[in-house]
Image (tube, helix red, strand yellow):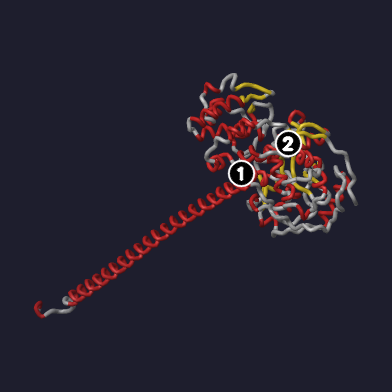
Amino acid sequence: MNPVTRSTRKYYFRKLDLSNLRKLGSLVTNHEEFNKCHGYLLSILKTNVEEGLLNTLVQFYDPAYHCFTFPDYQLVPTLEEYSYLIGLPLSDGEPFNGSEQTPKTSTIATALSLEPSDMVHPHYTTKGGFQGLTANFLHQKAIAFAQNKKTDAFHSLLALLIYGLVLFPDVDGFVNINAIKIFLTKNPVPTLLADTYHSIHDRTDKGQGTIHCCAQLLYKWFLLHLPNHFRTNPDNVRWSQKIMSLTPADIVWYNAAYDTGTIIDSCGEFPNVPLIGIRGGINYNPALAMRQFRYPMERPRYISLDGIFYLNQQDSSGMRGKFERAWRTIHKKGKGQLGRRSSMVSKSYTQWVIDRAAKYGMPYPLQRVPSSTSSSTPSPIPLETREDFQEQLTEAKLERDTWQRRAREAELKNETLSGEIERLKRQLLDQNRRLIEKDDLLRRKDALLGQDVSRKRKFMDLFDGPHPDFE
């Protein structure tokens, strides 16, 4: 069954003037140190988004299953992939939910190496209904810190500016309190993914409009799965035509770099993962992303794929509270629960996708015939530009240093345990020596006691019976 063509929608992503922020980023002299503390924010900042490609991608969003559905395959942005792209781990703590207590201005000032007097109007003010700090003030402070060689303070302000203007953009030239809260928790990944899904879903539901999420991160995620020839388009072929010509064999399904061995499978009582964004909540289904972790891709049967979506101002059913409580119990799955690694994709799953694409429709004309028997061999990881290669090399070095540090810690622990074992051996030998000495001493005492008893008996024998001297 060939999918029908449905009408496309007009979507937009916020156009950000990042020139001043990029100049500020160029003042970072130690990228390794910055990345260790704040992740790959500089890489996100330097990403130039091909808006045409991104606008084409969102046309494939599937509002029923919260994923991107193509003629005979699906792609699902995951927490683990976003964590890899931004270079920050997934915390086991509760993510941002919007109902947290607003941090005190003194707490914010201390975290940013600011003076308490800085946290007053007009620097700390209200815009768009939220409190926050003006970007111009933070920018000036960051330059001053950089000039005075206050590296940690400079890095923190630069990172916060990227949080407020790139990761969680809202009012131009303003870093609101939500971005500050997320920055302080150092756990932005769930919120970033939530904003991506939530905003695309909201705009899809409305049929048009501006998508409020980190476009750079979504763009990097899509490139993560595209073949090398998508990096360039010298013939100016339409992005829709290029995407519609892709087969499952063209997709880069798996990258070991984002595979930590475990996957967040669900939270609380939800059969999938609830995500809390800045403007509301939405869930996504890791069951549809097994192929991206090199596990067998089967047609989902046992898990509910029903979509949940709410807006904060319209949450009459209290869904946000349920989402908040769910994140207090995170369910992860590893190899033991997911089975053996395999690129196998069942025909029933692919046919299920083909049927879904036919029912919902494709936004562009088909360039090929969808097939449930198409090859699922993953393509090689795309080549990178010189700048991207350098960035990945830095990331690889950081990962290497992490493993080396863990190895040294393990060796130190092993040496400590070995020393403790030797100490216990010596202690045991000393105790055995003392026991032998005690046993020897007891034997000598027994021998002396035996001799004493014998002498006493001989002495008493002298008085047994009549003695001549007494006669």
The residue indicated by pointer 2 is 281
Q: Which mark is residue 247?
A: none
Please say if 80 is above or below 463: above
- Other residues around mark 1 within 10 Å, as few (<14) / some (14–19) / many (≥20): many
Residue 272, percent from left and from top? 73, 45
Confirm whether residue 227 shows in the render.
Answer: yes
Q: Secondary structure at mark 2?
A: strand
Q: Earlier in the sequence, mark 2 or mark 1?
A: 1
**Residue farthest along the top direction in this orientation:** 121
Left or right of 47: which side holds 364? right
Mark 2 neighbour class, 10 Å CA radius: few under 14, some 14 to 19, many 20 or more: many
The disc labelled 1 sits on which kind of residue?
A: Gly
Q: Which amino acid type is marked by label 2?
A: Gly
x 69%, y 59%: residue:
341
Height in image: 244 above or below 347? above
Q: CA distance from mark 2 to mark 1?
A: 24 Å
Q: Nearer the viewer, residue 341 or 332?
A: 341
Q: Which disc, if any, is residue 87?
A: 1
